[in-house]
Image (spheres, rainbow, N blue to C red):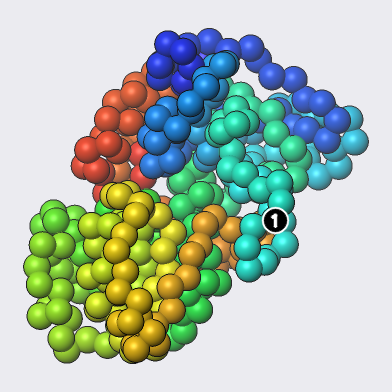
Amino acid sequence: MKAIIHGDEGLRLGEMPTPAAKKGEVVVALKTAGLNRRDLYIPARRENKGHDLILGSDGAGVVEAVGQDVTRWSVGDEVMINPSLNWFEKSDGSPEGFRLLGMPDDGTFAEKIVISEEQLEFRPAYLSWEESASIGLAGLTGFRALITRGKMKKGDTVFVPGAGSGVVTLIIQFAKAAGARVIVTSRSEEKREQALKLGADRAINTHADWNEELKDETIDLVIESVGKATFNRSLQSLKNGGRLVVFGATTEDVIDLDLRELFNRQQEIVGSMMGSRDELREMLVFAEKHHIRPVIDRILPLDDALEGFKMLEDSSQFGKIVFTV
């Protein structure tokens, strides 16, 4: 079958063996697959390649075959992939055995995938195939960071540096639907305008003086994913006693932190990563109730997937890049 593969020959479009379902597994014929920033970073992280790996964490398709003892699914069911493997009940931290689909397991950038029946959910009927392949990883990540870990409540002001990622475009919609005031940043005037159209209350220039821009705001919660380039500025913008949730670091991982200022201002820094099946299902119910749709910037055939990787590397997209299989 056709797939986007990383191995000793680098990242490429190639052929991989067609998978078969074992006990408790399901074969899904994929229709769409969503690109995430994680997919961009995996080639550099694979120290000893050893074998070809199919990338991709998000996908949606039709059940083609079921293995022995599968009870939840039947051939013909329309499903989406839950990329958060082996994390089912909501918890403060991820359990032993948790990992993300797409490394070390073969992922969704292929014509078919074999996966445990526990990792599938029915595709939301109100979403398109492309949207169904865009809401899993980004929606779960954003929902846990905002609601579970951020403990956002109605009336809060939420500040989110970086307005263009798939996660942030969903966070804007989640936060507004839950009754928050939302402020975002971007270097791009076009992305700031798009964020405002999506529902953000304010969109400021990343290069502006945030202390000046936000002097009349009280920031209750910051959701950080940029990393070193903005982290300390984000913390400075946060109110005394406020909470900063960090779920990523698209710039450098390591920061300098003024501990005295942190404890004097009694702020909280909270880590967040992906989430449980419980939270995925909560997110899907919430999204359908408020008719929240992932923002899709570009739809490309799987044959042109490497073009999508280049767009993501340049951060030129607003929202998700999706492949049709």
Name the residue at 50% across, 33% down: 56
Q: Residues within 10 Å of mark 1 (few under 14, many from 20)?
A: some
Name the residue at 53% across, 10% down: 15
Residue 136 in the image, given as x and y percentages of width and height: 53, 50
Residue 148 in the image, given as x and y percentages of width and height: 55, 72
- For the question of whether residue 226 can be seen, the reply is yes
Residue 66 in the image, given as x and y percentages of width and height: 80, 30
Name the residue at 44% across, 86% down: 154
Q: How many marks?
A: 1
Task: Specify whether 51 is left or right of 301.
Answer: right
Quadrant of the rendered image containing residue 239: bottom left
Name the residue at 65% across, 15% down: 18
Q: Vertical placement of 140 versus 182: above or below?
A: above
Q: Which residue of the protein is positioned furthest toward the front in this rendering?
A: 260
Which amino acid, by three-letter code, is at mark 1?
Pro
- In this rendered view, identify the residue nearer to me: 65 or 48: 48
Residue 255 in the image, given as x and y percentages of width and height: 31, 60
Mark 1 highlights which residue? 95
Q: Vertical placement of 9 versus 321: above or below?
A: above
| Rendered-image quadrant of the N terminus | top right
- Secondary structure state at the residue bearing disc 1: loop
- For the question of whether residue 35 can be seen, the reply is no
